[in-house]
Image (cartoon, coloured by chain):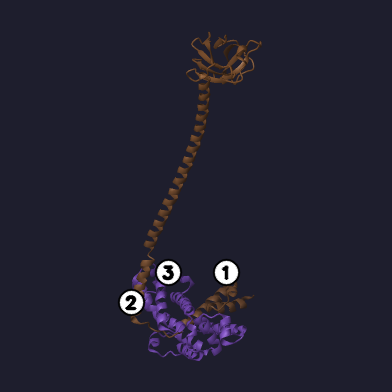
Chain colours: A brown, B purple
Amino acid sequence: MGHEDFESIAALDAIGAATAGEASALRIHLSGCIPCRRARDEYADAALSIAMSLVPVHPPAWLRTRVIAAKEEAERRFNPWWLAVAATLFFALWGWREFGIRVAREHDASQRAEIERLREENGLLSQRTEKLSSEMAALSAHDTRTIALSGQEVAPAASARVFLEPNRRRAIVFFHALPANPNDKSYQLWIIRADQPKPVSAGVFDVTQTGDASIVVENLPVATEIKALAVTLEPKGGVDQPTNTTFYVAGNASM
Amino acid sequence: MNTTAPAAALLPAIARGDVSAFEALYDRHSSTIYALLLRILANADDAQEVLQETFVKAWTSAKMFDAVRGSEVAWLISIARSRGIDRLRSRKIRYEREDEAGREISVRSAFVDHTTGADQAIQSQERTAVRGALSELPDPQRIALELAYFEGLSQSEIAEKLNEPLGTIKTRMQLGMKKLRDRLQAFH
């Protein structure tokens, strides 16, 4: 379409008679065409003159009072102060709600973490209970034998007591007053058997700050094959065979 | 507020909440707006209601007025015409209006008959020139413009109403608007 076409559309648009498509095309064209914008303004003036050419008619005098009153009513309804107060109240409530939701979520997360922690603690306690029950069963069994290990030269105050269940080939050993083991070393319990020349590892352990510890030894040799028990200090995690002959506690398993 | 303040100064004052400016705006333009609404609605009660709506809208939306885009009265006429045509459509007043012949006589009267007392008080050279330009338009062109401007009818609705081809109606309106524009330019 050329400028004349758009001017013709502008004439129709000024009186609201352009189609939606024509009006849309005109808007686009006017954004870049100064002469057509001028023509549009001229036609708008011409359209305005249609209304302005009407003989003015004074409305009833009472209508003025009604319009002023309606304006005041509208002012009350659309008072920016009320809008501001309403908006402030809305955002305050919304903010409070969001804050409440956030607090509830954080509380929920905290509760979940606490439940998880308690679950882990419960697991540990169950294990501990199981161990204590096992130890109690071993200590109270009618055939349980006791072997005392005494402190040696490097730890004269130390001692240990072995509760041996021959039928179950299991033993529980309680250590007392052993020196604290260095971080890079562990204590290792050895069984010296009558039928074998080399000692056999029965377990690796660390002691508490008071020098105490306890271990459960499973799959023991038959009681008659256990000749003696001794504890050495070995590299962390234990070794296959003792690296030294410095015993901390030791004792014979004589029947 | 001085009621003789320049026209463009009233709406900014109203936007600031100046009640006397609002009253001045009403005093200055209510007769023009009322005449337009009577012409559109052909019913005094409806015209009074829409007149009220128009000025309340002016009060609540005065800050939206942009003097660069048009005059104060043009802004008011735009509001009034839009609301008047909406009211006309919603109440389907057009179906209850007087028949075409009778309506045409009243339209011609509104455009051409300028001898009333109210008109004499407000009459201006420009209004006279416009009225002259309108009265000089051939009836088919003038009627097509009236139906579009005062009744808000589309090109196709006018063609159907007048039982004429759409192209003919479009040409009549374009020619009528061009003559009106040329006449106004000649006056200025």
Vertical comparison of A90 with A243: above or below: below
Q: Which mark is residue A65?
A: 2
Image position of B153 with respect to A199: above or below: below
Residue A220 position within the rendered picture, expressed as x and y whole percent measured from the top left = 61, 18
Cα–Cα gap, marks 2 and 3 = 20 Å
Q: Position of residue A112 (x, y in %)?
A: 49, 40
Whether residue A42 is visible here, answered yes or no, is no
Of tags 2 and 1, the one toward the viewer is 2
Taking depth in this image into account, of A103 and A108 the one nearest to the observer is: A108
Secondary element at tag 2: helix
Dot 3: what SS? helix
Write down the quadrant of residue A71 in the picture: bottom left
Q: Amino acid at mark 1?
A: Ser
| Nearer-the-camera pick, A28 or B86 | B86
Which-is-in-front pick, marks 2 and 3? 2
> In x, y percent, where is residue B176?
55, 85
According to the image, label 3 marks what residue?
Answer: B61
Residue flagged by tag 3: what amino acid is it?
A: Ser
Marking on residue B166: none
How many neighbours does mark 1 have within 10 angstroms: few (below 14), some (14-19), or many (20 or more)? few
For the question of whether residue A48 can be seen, the reply is yes
Tell me the tag on residue A31.
1
| Label 1 secondary element | loop
In this picture, residue A234 sits left or right of residue A53: right
